[in-house]
Amino acid sequence: MSTVSDKEEGLENSVAQAKANSKRRSPRRQRRSDCIQVQKESSPLDQLKQLLLKDDRQRIVVVSGAGISQSAGLSTFSDDKKGLYAQAGKRFGLSDGSHVFRYRFLKDRPSDCFQFFYKLYQQAIQAKPTLSHKALQNLMNQGRIQHHFTLNIDGLHAHAHAHDSQSASASASASAIELHGTLHQLVCPKCTKVFSTAEILPVVPSQPKKRKRYSIPPTCPHCNDTTTRLRFRILMYNDEQPNLIWDHDPLDNNNNLQHVSAVLWIGISFQQQASCAHFQKVWEATKRNHQMAQPIHYIINPNANEALQDLQSVVGHLGPTNVVTVEATSDDLLESFAFSSD
Ligand SMILES: [Zn+2]
């Protein structure tokens, strides 16, 4: 494991090497070096690619959101017309579509809530992992990313991981940690047993002959009690049963966020309270758990500056030196790592 002193030593060595090289350089070579120095003033996107490509002494943590699954054809939350909030508002007559993700909605309208997530599940199982999902898995396998937390419930990270495990990379590391749970699992609030969604429900609900063979929400096969209904293993806002998703919030585990040098927030708009709360938690934990330089937080999003403004309106102003906005899609950043084989 690399340490801060390793990093400093590495830096000193490279400075000494650079000095030695510059003494040996011919004037012609020096001119070329000047050109290279100009190129070093690269965009934040290029700097970030370099960080992922070359600097394996960095401890990098990724937190990903809906933007990463957008090129797989899945909706984000707050797109004006096609977003999940707009869809839910229209379908269930809610003045604020985001209420579909509240525990209150699950409690008051369990059948509508279940139908909503069931539809999302059907979309998710037809989607394929994007280049970004594959790239993030590659980078994890190579040890360049230490931890990957995702706010996404579509299971595409797990899909990329499962595919990778079957391929040549037998040493495939862990998959992403799904902070908000997954559409691919159902859980019983009574006995807490977790089921694969595919095990309980047909993929296509509109097969007339099979329609009556299951109820919505389904009963728990383990409890055998008709009054106990399964719910999707997805964390709702103000969830009164958060233990069904996690015993402990993975972001509270200090080992996950120790000595982190960079945190990449990819495809997150910071328009949801939950993502701002996660940022605050990671920001505080990485600050606390780092003895030397503070980690840099990169916000990677086509509207990164807007996302930063939204974030700061919730968590307050963040120091300018520790946050870098990168106006790019996740595929712009990660595409070149998707087919990497080393
Ligand atoms: Zn049960």
Image (tube, rainbow, N blue to C red):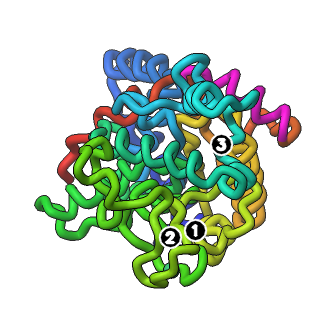
Question: What x and y, as percent, mark residue 278?
Answer: 70, 52
Seen from the viewer's position, the closer of residues 144 and 148 is: 148
Q: Can residue 245 be seen in this view?
A: yes
Q: Is residue 51 left or right of residue 311?
A: left
Question: What x and y, as percent, mark residue 234?
Answer: 56, 58
**Disc marking residue 187:** 2
Query: Mark 2: which amino acid?
Result: Val
**Disc marking residue 100:** 3
Q: Which residue is drawn at 26% across and 44% down?
A: 208
Residue 185 occupies quadrant: bottom left
Q: Distance between the residues labelled 1 and 3?
A: 18 Å
Residue 198 occupies quadrant: bottom left
Secondary structure of residue under mark 2: strand
Q: Which of marks 1 and 3 is in front?
A: 3
Which region of the structure is painted magenta?
301-314
Tag 2 near tag 1, CB within 8 Å: yes
